[in-house]
Image (spheres, rainbow, N blue to C red):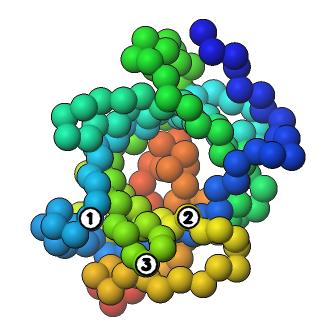
Amino acid sequence: MDKEVQSRPSAEEPLEIERKFLIRYPDVSLLERICSRKADMSQTYLRSEKKLSRRVRRRTINGEEDYWYNEKVKLSDTTRIERERQITEAQYRELLKEAIPDAQTIQKTRYDLPSGDLCFEIDIFPEWTDRAFAEVELENEDQEFVFPDCLSIIKEVTEDDRYTNSSLARNGFVYDEIEGES
């Protein structure tokens, strides 16, 4: 098996600088036409040390499956150290034995929406029919960007831990009232 990923950050670790938005449920037929990629994903969160999030992901693109192991160490609400590597199906199945008890496996469809130099990742979950997520990875925490016109922001949830995928897996999906709807 591959060398285990260390849980302590080093000076040259890859950073994920990301902002996350709760959006109104998008026009899926439009996304099917304008997005560069669509992937069906199954994410299972694994037992880990405090401040470390571990997961495995099965991803299907155009009928082809691949498997990924991921670790994140939170540095701030926006920035995390992210370690990710592709794994075999056998490794994936073995790691599933380390799943957090009573946590659900997250199912979602991700659409990659290019916008200028950036790519917005739109995540649609079967649990929600009126909302979805849009995430964008940035070069730095202060980078400015323009949100795609085809998406309607409800609110930014970057700093709201209830909206992390790990929290959704452990605690269930959040059903806050959407302003302007009853």
Sequence order check: which comes first, mark 1 or mark 3? 1
Three-letter amino acid code of the residue under disc 2: Glu
Q: CA distance from mark 1 to mark 2?
A: 16 Å
Q: Position of residue 164 (x, y in %)?
A: 55, 55
Q: Position of residue 47 (x, y in %)?
A: 63, 27
Sequence order check: which comes first, mark 1 or mark 2? 1
Q: Which residue is mark 1?
A: 35
> In this orientation, which residue lies closer to the viewer: 172 or 13?
13
Say few, some or many: other residues with alpha carbon within 10 Å of mark 2 (under 14 / 14 to 19 / 20 or more).
Answer: some
The quadrant of the picture occupied by the N terminus is top right
**Residue beneath the point at 26% across and 41% down:** 61
**Of the numbered discs in the image, which one, if any, rests on residue 137?**
2
Three-letter amino acid code of the residue under disc 1: Cys
Q: Which residue is mark 3?
A: 116
Instruction: Give the secondary structure at mark 3.
Output: loop
Say few, some or many: other residues with alpha carbon within 10 Å of mark 3 (under 14 / 14 to 19 / 20 or more).
Answer: few
Q: Position of residue 139 (x, y in %)?
A: 65, 68
**Residue beneath the point at 19% across and 34% down:** 63
Is 127 left, or right, of 63 in this rendering? right
